[in-house]
Image (cartoon, rainbow, N blue to C red):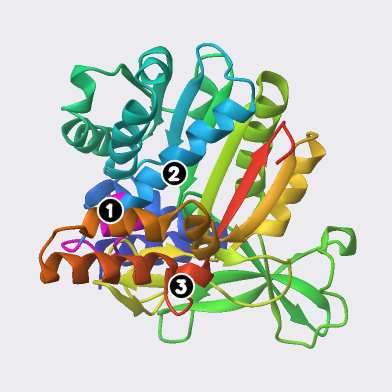
Amino acid sequence: MTKLKEKLKRLIEATGPISVAEYMAHCLLDPEFGYYTTREPFGTEGDFITAPEISQMFGELIGVWIYSRWKSAGSPRNPIIAEIGPGRGTLMKDLLRTVSRLDPAFAREARFALVEASSRLIEVQKRTLAEAARTISLEWYDRFGALPLGPLFIVGNELFDALPMRQFVKTANGWRERVVGLDEQGELAFFAGAAGLDANALPPGVTGTPEGSVMEISPAREALMDVIAERLGRQGGAGLFIDYGYERSGVGDTLQAVRRHAYDDVLAHPGEADVTSHVDFEALARVARRHGLATALTTQGDFLLGLGLLERAGRLGAGKSKTVQESIRDAVERLAGPDQMGTLFKVLMVTNNPF
């Protein structure tokens, strides 16, 4: 039994069942035993590998996209290039190298920022970016609202999946919020709670679903997109958000846990497994459009291939050993292959200028 599981059991015994959103928040951010507050989750030594860790090509192509959106916006002066939830800083490192080569004057003028709440991760990011920081100004902010004013070009890779979401289960008495409580043996278990959901809050396409169906909504994710979209609509710029998820709102239980690079029971090891769920990109796009932004949604595979992934892989592999070339080919397949990240991961682009 993990220490966080013991803590959650005591909490539930004292105050009653907690929502799935509360459970996710405890698992990831508990100040004593939370997943992100106590360990290094990224890379081969962690529990999962993100796209920037697979290949430098990922961050490089995002750098190309950022630069092209800046040019499309009319090359505004003093742009802010930000990453929110930057992990170990690998994506930003590759992005900085790319834009510095594309346009050294742009790299000197732009203000580069990382939005990170974890002091532990900030230290990791500073080590990753130490060389780049010798020639490029980098600033850290603990929340999005602290970013300086100006045209903003922002990236969030695997950002929204880490924010809590609420689950509702269809019962004979309507939709009831799914909660985590204690079963007869005193173990963590899921139940249908007393709280309901107003029919007006149902997303399109979920009426008429059978009993037992699970629907997920995330006010936290929509709230973050709301503040980002409001800023982009007011100050100008563009946003790029990459995550695993689905294109259309619907029903389905996507709550999952990953531990040691394998799927784990969601209730088995709280605090020692990454607990996430798929992102509803249609819901996020609706929020952005309410602020007058243009949106475009595609798969990660199509996005990277459209930016020249194969061409970049060819240049990286030219003249290299067969072993290196094979490693590059494997990275391309992992990033863009339909049976790997290429289809599962979606890319949402938002901007106050038409695409």
211 vs 7, nearest the viewer: 211
Residue 304 on image: x %, y %: 47, 56
Q: Which numbered disc, 2 or 1, marks the residue closer to the eye?
A: 1
Residue 222 on image: x %, y %: 66, 46
Residue depicted at x 70% and y 41% = 355
Secondary structure under tag 2 reads: helix
Q: Which numbered disc, 3 or 1, marks the residue closer to the eye?
A: 1
Q: Is residue 16 magenta?
A: no
Sequence-wise first label, 2 or 1: 2
Left or right for 3, reference 248? left
Residue depicted at x 30% and y 66% = 331
- Is residue 41 visible in the rendered structure shown here? no
Q: Amino acid at mark 1?
A: Arg
Query: What stretch of residues is rendered in magenta?
Result: 44-56
Secondary structure under tag 1 reads: helix
Q: Residue furthest front?
A: 319
Q: Which residue is mark 3?
A: 256
Residue depicted at x 29% and y 33% = 97
Left or right for 136, reference 185? left
Q: Is residue 271 above or below residue 348?
A: below
Sequence-wise first label, 3 or 1: 3
Q: Which residue is mark 2?
A: 62
Residue depicted at x 83% and y 76% = 174
C-alpha separation, residue under disc 2 versus residue under disc 1: 17 Å
Secondary structure under tag 3 reads: strand
Number of marks in the rendered image: 3
- Is residue 110 visible in the rendered structure shown here? yes
Q: Which residue is mark 1?
A: 315
Residue 213 on image: x %, y %: 71, 82
Q: Is residue 51 magenta?
A: yes
